[in-house]
């Protein structure tokens, strides 16, 4: 119960943040799951920055103040800008909860409910690991709650990322006893929030088929359900990225500026999960900003400035905690790998021993992970066939930008598995978990593509010209 109370406070804080940033939709079914994701991202960013930059332990008064800041900011801004209209999405008449045809989507909905029940029950009856400092499951939240800040503690917290470290610990820093099961509850709530958001968002936009289809695709990936119960951080990253892609798709199809802001907020959250989260989120953020600039010009980019500034503070906090090399370990790994591959290439040329560098074997195992093993189901077979068959519809239905972002994340994941860290692909220790985030994003994008292709092609949308800043 103590965690549920903390979760309620997190949702209230997240709702205040959405209202303050004008990203609320005005519909409870959408705003509540989005508020959990946004509130968790806000608390994690603020708590980690306070601990690192100010050297203050996040105790009850500080945690309560962090949760209250968005609500207070919303109240102040509401007084400063009275009479703000209800968001466009909330005033829409296209809400439709029941997907069509029912004979197709009823089994999908039943499957989703069964998986949600199984995951929730299993997670609530499975002990959370607390002694594994490498996988950091409940270890990082315990360190965050205790205020540990030694060199080894900082390394663990940086490895886990602010969200997996601080969100499960919210109830503990608010005064409840440390209970590792809060880690299970936190990640299951995020799983439920993602599925609820997908279904509610699709229904709000008059496309419930896309929401239920995305939920079905996600729950059909066995590894996602497994790692929600195992509390690996890869599941956190996958869920934040999937939620971000839902709004990235929505922005491409509806061109609502607030959707770009929601996507950016969730991408900043994804960047705060593990050290890998930043690398996964940055290409998508780049594509999103390019799309915003093309659609809305500089004014659209300025709307995202507060979120990007907040993300910059978190990066500065990470540098302050572990130094520049420790904050960006992948740059060092890439430089080291480049020199190793160069030496291996010269040795291969000298002895004519093909495959000595290991890349062909790693590439084959990566392809097996995509198409032959059951960890991802049939997702990439269906994705590849759908892209080939429906290529002309991708641009017509506003999915080109989000498709580009998905392609970049997949290419980045492949480069990491085949080139940067081939040893982990060869021994099978990380290749499947590293595919989890891009697979979750692919499930959301694929569902949007299949549903869009089942409808008549939309008329081309003419983009309004940006006015010249010159004064005649």
Image (cartoon, rainbow, N blue to C red):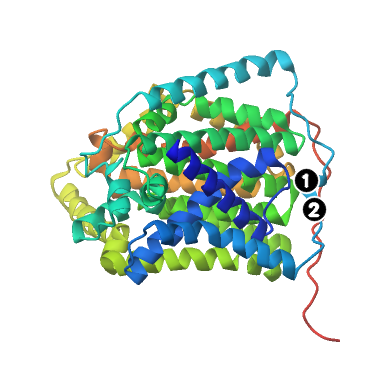
Name the residue furthest left: 351
Residue 12 point in image, percent of width and height: 58, 49
- Where does label 2 land, which residue? 86
Q: What residue appears at the point 50 percent right and 44 percent down from the top-left corner?
A: 240
Q: What residue appears at the point 79 percent right and 50 percent down from the top-left corner?
A: 88
Q: What residue appears at the point 86 percent right and 86 percent down from the top-left corner?
A: 472
Q: Secondary structure at mark 2?
A: loop
Badge 2 crowding class, 10 Å Cα cut-off, few under 14, some 14 to 19, many 20 or more, is: few
Residue 204 point in image, percent of width and height: 74, 38
Asked if residue 315 lies left or right of residue 389, the reply is left
Q: Is residue 215 above or below residue 134?
A: above
**In the foreground, 4 or 386:** 4
Q: Name the disc covering residue 90, or none.
A: 1
Asked if residue 277 lies left or right of residue 301, the reply is left
Mark 1 and mark 2 in contact (Cβ < 8 Å)? Answer: yes
Q: Name the disc covering residue 292, or none.
A: none
Badge 1 crowding class, 10 Å Cα cut-off, few under 14, some 14 to 19, many 20 or more, is: some
Q: Is residue 294 above or below residue 237?
A: below
| Alpha carbons under labels 2 and 1: distance apart | 7 Å
Q: Is residue 261 above or below residue 236?
A: below
Residue 49 point in image, percent of width and height: 40, 64
Q: Is residue 319 above or below residue 359?
A: below
Q: Secondary structure at mark 1?
A: helix
**In the foreground, 280 or 114:** 114
């Amino acid at each position: 119960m103590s965690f549920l109370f903390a979760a309620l406070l997190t949702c209230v804080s997240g709702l205040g943040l959405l209202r303050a940033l004008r990203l609320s939709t005005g519909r409870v079914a959408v705003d509540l799951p989005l508020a959990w994701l946004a509130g968790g991202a806000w608390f994690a960013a603020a708590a980690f920055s306070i601990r690192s930059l100010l050297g203050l332990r996040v105790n009850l008064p500080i945690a309560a103040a962090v949760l209250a800041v968005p609500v207070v900011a919303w109240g102040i801004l509401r007084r400063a800008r009275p009479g703000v209209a209800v968001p466009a999405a909330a005033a829409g008449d296209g809400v439709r909860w029941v997907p069509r045809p029912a004979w197709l989507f009823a089994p999908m909905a039943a499957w989703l409910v069964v998986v949600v029940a199984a995951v929730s029950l299993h997670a609530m009856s499975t002990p959370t690991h607390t002694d594994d400092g490498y996988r950091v499951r409940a270890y990082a939240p315990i360190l965050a709650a205790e205020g540990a800040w030694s060199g080894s503690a900082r390394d663990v917290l940086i490895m886990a990322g602010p969200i997996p470290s601080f969100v499960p610990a919210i109830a503990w820093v608010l005064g409840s006893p440390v209970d590792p099961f809060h880690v299970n509850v936190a990640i299951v709530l995020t799983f439920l929030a993602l599925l609820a958001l997908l279904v509610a968002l699709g229904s709000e936009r008059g496309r419930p088929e896309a929401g239920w289809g995305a939920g079905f695709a996600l729950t059909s990936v066995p590894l996602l359900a497994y790692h929600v119960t195992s509390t690996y951080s890869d599941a956190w990253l996958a869920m934040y990225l999937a939620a971000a892609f839902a709004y990235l798709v929505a922005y491409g199809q509806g061109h609502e500026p607030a959707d770009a802001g929601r996507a950016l907020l969730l991408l900043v959250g994804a960047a705060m999960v593990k050290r890998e989260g930043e690398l996964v989120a940055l290409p998508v953020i780049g594509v999103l900003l390019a799309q915003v600039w093309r659609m809305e010009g500089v004014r659209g980019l300025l709307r995202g400035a507060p979120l990007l500034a907040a993300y910059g503070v978190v990066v500065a906090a990470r540098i302050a905690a572990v130094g520049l090399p420790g904050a960006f370990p992948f740059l060092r790994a890439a430089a080291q790998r480049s020199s190793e591959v160069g030496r291996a290439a010269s040795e291969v040329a000298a002895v004519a021993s093909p495959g000595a560098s290991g890349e062909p074997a790693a590439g084959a195992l990566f392809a097996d992970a995509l198409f032959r093993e059951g960890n991802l189901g049939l997702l990439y077979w269906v994705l590849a066939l759908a892209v080939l068959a429906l290529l002309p519809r991708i641009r017509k239905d506003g999915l080109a930008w989000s498709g580009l972002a998905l392609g970049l994340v997949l290419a980045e994941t492949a480069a990491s598995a085949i080139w940067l860290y081939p040893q982990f692909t060869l021994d099978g220790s990380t290749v499947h978990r590293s595919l989890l985030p891009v697979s979750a994003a692919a499930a959301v994008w694929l569902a949007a593509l299949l549903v869009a292709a089942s409808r008549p092609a939309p008329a081309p949308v003419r983009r309004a010209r940006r006015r010249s800043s010159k004064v005649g």
